[in-house]
Amino acid sequence: MVCELNTQKELSLSEFIKILYEFNNIDALTLCVKTLKDKYTLDEVKDLSDEELYKYFVEAENSLQ
């Protein structure tokens, strides 16, 4: 799964909502982010690998099924 989001540019709320609108499984994404916020600081999340982050997303998807 590949999602491109340019973090070097600040997005307006409306731009961010439009990007999220196109995301297929927003419920899993929301649960994934909530889980990460409960476990890690922002700096720790930035240090996680793509594989580790994807694992959290898949776990969120599975828990919603």
Image (spheres, rainbow, N blue to C red):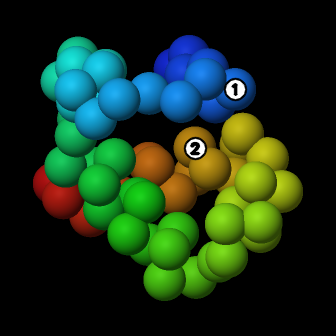
Neighbours of disc 1 within 10 Å: few (<14), some (14-19), many (20+): few
Q: Could you tell me if residue 2 is visible in this image? A: no
Residue at image position (77%, 66%) is: 43
Q: Which residue is mark 2?
A: 54
Residue at the extreme right: 47
Q: Which residue is mark 1?
A: 8
Residue at image position (76%, 54%) is: 46
- Residue 60 image label: none
Quadrant (top left, top right, bottom left, bottom right) of the C terminus: bottom left
Q: Could you tell me if residue 14 is visible in this image? A: yes
Q: Secondary structure at mark 2?
A: helix
Residue at image position (64%, 30%) is: 7
Distance from Cα at disc 1 to Cα at disc 2: 22 Å
Between circles 1 and 2, the one closer to the viewer is 1
Amino acid type indicated by mark 2: Tyr
Amino acid type indicated by mark 1: Gln
Residue at image position (19%, 49%) is: 27
* Quarter occupied by residue 45: bottom right
Is tag 1's residue or tag 2's residue first in the polypeptide sequence?
Answer: 1
Q: Position of residue 53 (x, y in %)?
A: 62, 50
